[in-house]
Image: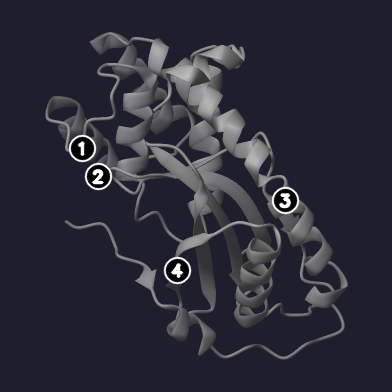
Amino acid sequence: MRIADYKSTKEYILAAEIPTKTRTYAPVSHQQLVDLTLESIHKAGFTLDKETYSSYNDGKMANGRYTISNVADSEMQLQIGWQNSYDKTASLKFAIGTQILICQNGCVSGDYGAFRKKHMGSVEEFAPAFIKEYINRAGDSFRKMQLERVVMKQIELSKRDKAELLGRLFLEEELISTMQMNIIAKEIENPTFDYGAPNSVWELYQHTTYAMKETHPRMWISDHIKAHNFFINATGSLVTADEAELETLA
């Protein structure tokens, strides 16, 4: 059985019908988010590489993800994302993360927190200033994720270690499904990509996000934040790597 494909286009999500504003609910349109995000990326001095979208329920639930080409290294690049819904199934969220170049996996760091906004007022009242500030901080966020990658690459896992971590992801955290567990098991046995650190926390993390690529749009940001925090916390790698170690990055 194949995992559902939620990939979409900008044109498709922008065509979704916007609900009527009420006393307690003010919809934020996908169009407003696209325009404000792209404008803020440009004003922050970032260069947009590509924009990708996923959606559900005829575009009423959507995600936008934007990769930045001039905040990157040889392995990953900055990614800025948002989540929005017209069907009241999710709050408006923004998050900062990275995209792994070799496999297009997404990593979203929870250390910076996904911004959440309940749909109670006009996007113009809060979003422009917020998005500008949030995106301006994205370079620092990227550097911290580089340091976290260095640490995770240095931690080697035995077969039992991997089994314990995956068991916790499945049973305790309920972050991966049986189908995703099977994908990860196959990746461990015969990796599709070389992440440059065999049998490390970093490699297992990437196998996991590889299996999470087609996570439901409503859960994409929150599940990826949870996964990132899990691999940082579960291995004790919250200890920041020395800045000098970044010199070893290509």
Q: Viewer-nearest of labels 3 and 1?
A: 3
- Please give the residue where the numbered disc 2 appears in the rendered image: 179
Type of amino acid under label 1: Asn
Nearer to us in this view, 140 or 199: 140
Query: Is 204 drawn above or below residue 39 in the view shown?
Result: above
First of labels 2, 3 by sequence position? 3
Whether residue 177 is visible: no
Q: Position of residue 217 (x, y in %)?
A: 47, 61
Q: Residues within 10 Å of mark 3 (few under 14, many from 20)?
A: some
First of labels 4, 2 by sequence position? 4
Q: Position of residue 103 (x, y in %)?
A: 29, 45
Q: Residues within 10 Å of mark 2 (few under 14, many from 20)?
A: few
The answer to whether 136 appears left or right of 215 in the picture is: right
Query: Is 38 drawn above or below residue 231 in the view shown?
Result: below
The answer to whether 106 appears left or right of 28 in the picture is: left
Q: Residues within 10 Å of mark 1 (few under 14, many from 20)?
A: few
- Please give the residue where the numbered disc 3 appears in the rendered image: 136
Q: Position of residue 160 (x, y in %)?
A: 28, 10
Query: Is 243 drawn above or below residue 73 in the view shown?
Result: above
The answer to whether mark 2 and mark 1 are in CB contact below 8 A is yes
Type of amino acid under label 4: Tyr
Q: Quadrant of the C terminus?
A: top left
- Please give the residue where the numbered disc 4 appears in the rendered image: 53
